[in-house]
Image (cartoon, rainbow, N blue to C red):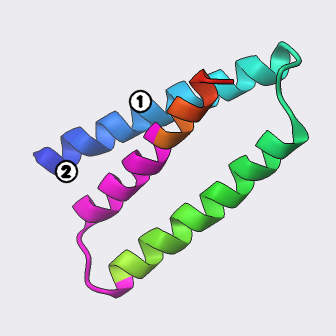
Amino acid sequence: MKLAADTSLLAMEAQAVIWTRMMQIASGRGSAAENMLMVTEKVSAFAEAAMTVAAGGSAHKVVRGYRRHVRANARRLRHK
């Protein structure tokens, strides 16, 4: 049950970050650097998740890691 709840929270938090980024881009506040960071962060987060799974980590640990990255993105975007 905890995994399902955390996965649902991850989905909502990620959508909020996507919405914030799209609003910044639409209002002209987006930057090429932010766009590049968006891509590199996704690759890095995936690699981290893959290493967690390869090391025997649980799905819950993977979701927690993704949520940590999404929260960091949300904080950074709020301060731009």
For the point 20% across and 39% down, the residue is 5
Examine the rendered structure and indicate whether residue 30 appears above or below residue 60.
Answer: above
Q: Secondary structure at mark 2?
A: helix
Q: Residue at x 86, y 34 (%)?
A: 31
Task: Give the left or right position of residue 23, taking residue 48 as reference.
Answer: right
Badge 1: residue crowd in 10 Å (few <14, some 14–19, many ≥20):
few
Residue 49 at x, y = what percent?
43, 69
List the residue tagged with mark 2.
3
Which residues, given as a range, are shown in magenta? 54-71
In the rendered view, would you say 71 is above or below 55?
Answer: above
Nearest the eye: 56 or 76: 76
Prevailing secondary structure of the magenta residues: helix
Please identify the quarter of the rendering in which residue 8 is found.
top left
Magenta highlight on residue 61: yes
Mark sitting on residue 12: 1
Rendered view: 69 above or below 9: below
Q: Is residue 26 left or right of residue 18?
A: right
In the image, residue 10 lies at what x, y percent? Answer: 38, 40
Instruction: Kindly state the secondary structure of the residue where label 1 is placed.
Output: helix
Split into 4 quadrants, where in the image is the N terminus? Answer: top left
Q: Residue furthest top?
A: 27
Most extreme residue toward the left is: 1
Q: Amino acid at mark 1?
A: Met
Depicted 13 relative to depicted 4: above or below: above
Residue at 55 percent of width and 39 percent of height = 73
Q: Residue 11 vs residue 7: left or right?
A: right
At label 2, the amino acid type is Leu
Residue 65 position, x and y percent, is: 37, 57
